[in-house]
Image (cartoon, rainbow, N blue to C red):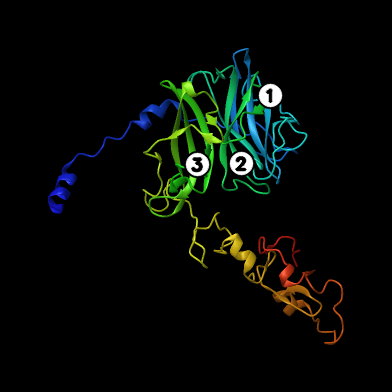
């Protein structure tokens, strides 16, 4: 029976691929300008730019973009009349911090967007590739879906959630609701999105609001990955779609609609290279560029490996006095030929020495020394 079923399945024709190349042909071969649209500035790193227009000002383009200053995400805005030259601002338009707009929102630790917000998807009048991106009102307000970061001090920190900002004029924005409309704590969350919710893109179609969003969790092959899903909300429910600290958005049963892990290794849509902790086998919560292969919590409670010098990548060893010096440098430079063994080292004979607290007091962050001078 199983053999017959197998032969039948092999005889079925393959599903025809959509003509994506033909659809996208006229949108290829862009000319890239050498200059920045938004140059690096004092506010921090710029990311996730989104451009829109207002019906009241058809000759002006507005760009919102996210800025990261090492603490968290904040949103600012630039303006242009030709899409090439942009007038930036030194002020933020959306931030959870005290004294920064919206002034009536100062996030407290534990909220889904305490670490900041990244504007992703505004509600538009028309989503055609050839139509102007004009903001659309719903319930008397303009709406912007955003990714909320729950903690400060890093990029894309888990678990994350999706919220809404609203505006009366399309320029000044306020937080619509303290409850995220997509969160890892929702009762219908599935494994593929259990680690973090990212990048909600909002649109309206066929009598309902639709959100495409990105999330992180184990894929069908058990690899920690990022995949995409769809959630819907009837127009009758009204934005932001939350009520009594719960979401009214419905996740599609077929999620994730864009999967990873289906292509061969090295393809653009294979799973991300997250690794398993070498101590207890759990999935690492972030990519592991230093090759430690351990969770942050494991690093905190286990003795760290010997730090390595950024200058020469050699291990460092403890010497009398509680300091640490480069092993390689100590071998080569710590005792010049014209100095007796008991004679103290002269200035400049040791490439690097730093006082470290006792092991129990030592923090467990990155194990690479960041300020080791070169020989």
Q: In this view, does 349 lie to the left or right of 318?
A: right
Structural distance between the alpha carbons of marks 2 and 1? 21 Å
> Given this view, does label 3 or label 2 mark the residue nearer the observer?
3
- Across and down, in percent, residue 65 comes to 64, 33
- Across and down, in percent, residue 312 comes to 68, 67
Q: In this view, does 349 lie to the left or right of 267?
A: right
Dot 2 surroundings within 10 Å: few (below 14), some, or many (20 or more)? many
Residue placed under numbered mark 1 in the picture = 172
Task: Determine which quarter of the picture holds residue 306.
Answer: bottom right
- The local secondary structure at tag 3 comes to loop
Among numbered discs 3 and 2, the one appearing first in the sequence:
2
Residue placed under numbered mark 2 in the picture = 112
Q: Residue at x 41, y 21 (%)?
A: 206
Structural distance between the alpha carbons of marks 3 and 2? 13 Å
- Across and down, in percent, residue 164 comes to 58, 30
Find out whether the residues at labels 3 and 1 contact each other: C-beta distance under 8 Å: no
Residue 360 sits above or below residue 104 on the image: below
Residue 336 sits above or below residue 164 on the image: below
Dot 3 surroundings within 10 Å: few (below 14), some, or many (20 or more)? few
> Given this view, does label 2 or label 1 mark the residue nearer the observer?
2
Q: How many marks?
A: 3
> Is residue 181 something one can see in this rendering?
no
Q: Residue 59 carries which label?
A: none
Judging depth in this view, the residue of 2 and 64 nearest the camera is 2
Quadrant (top left/top right/bottom left/bottom right) for the C terminus: bottom right
Judging depth in this view, the residue of 336 and 125 nearest the camera is 125
Residue placed under numbered mark 3 in the picture = 186
Residue 25 sits above or below residue 349 on the image: above
> Given this view, does label 3 or label 1 mark the residue nearer the observer?
3
Q: Which residue is drawn at 44% across and 48% down?
A: 191
- The local secondary structure at tag 1 comes to loop
């Amino acid at each position: 029976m199983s053999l017959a079923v197998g032969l039948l399945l092999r005889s079925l024709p393959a599903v025809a691929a959509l003509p994506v190349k033909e659809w996208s042909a006229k949108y290829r071969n862009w000319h890239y300008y050498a200059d920045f649209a938004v140059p690096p500035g004092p506010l921090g790193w710029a990311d996730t730019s989104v451009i829109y227009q207002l019906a009241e000002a058809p000759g002006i383009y507005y760009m919102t973009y996210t800025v990261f200053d090492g603490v968290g995400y904040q949103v600012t805005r630039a303006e242009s009349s030709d899409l090439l030259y942009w007038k930036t601002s030194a002020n933020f338009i959306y931030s959870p911090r005290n004294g920064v707009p919206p002034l009536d929102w100062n996030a407290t630790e534990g909220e889904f967007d305490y670490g900041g917000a990244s504007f992703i998807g505004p509600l538009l009048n028309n989503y055609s590739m050839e139509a102007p991106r004009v903001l659309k009102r719903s319930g008397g307000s303009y709406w912007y879906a955003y990714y909320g970061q729950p903690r400060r001090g890093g990029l894309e920190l888990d678990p994350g959630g999706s919220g809404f900002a609203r505006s009366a004029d399309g320029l000044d924005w306020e937080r619509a609701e303290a409850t995220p409309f997509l969160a890892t704590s929702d009762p219908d969350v599935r494994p593929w999105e259990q680690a973090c919710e990212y990048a909600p893109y909002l649109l309206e179609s066929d009598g309902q609001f639709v959100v495409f969003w990105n999330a992180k969790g184990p894929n069908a092959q058990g690899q920690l990955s990022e995949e995409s899903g769809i959630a819907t909300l009837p127009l009758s429910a009204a934005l932001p779609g939350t009520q009594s600290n719960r979401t009214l958005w419905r996740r599609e049963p077929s999620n994730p609609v864009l999967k990873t892990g289906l292509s061969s290794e090295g393809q653009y849509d294979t799973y991300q290279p997250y690794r398993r902790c070498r101590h207890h086998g759990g999935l690492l919560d972030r990519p592991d560029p230093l090759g430690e292969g351990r969770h942050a919590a494991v690093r905190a409670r286990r003795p760290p490996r010997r730090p390595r010098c950024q200058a020469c990548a050699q291990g460092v060893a403890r010497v009398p006095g509680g300091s640490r010096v480069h092993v390689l440098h100590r071998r080569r430079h710590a005792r010049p030929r014209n100095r007796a063994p008991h004679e103290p080292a002269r200035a400049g004979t040791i490439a690097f020495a730093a006082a470290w607290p006792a092991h129990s007091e030592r923090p467990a962050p990155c194990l690479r020394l960041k300020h080791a001078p070169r020989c």
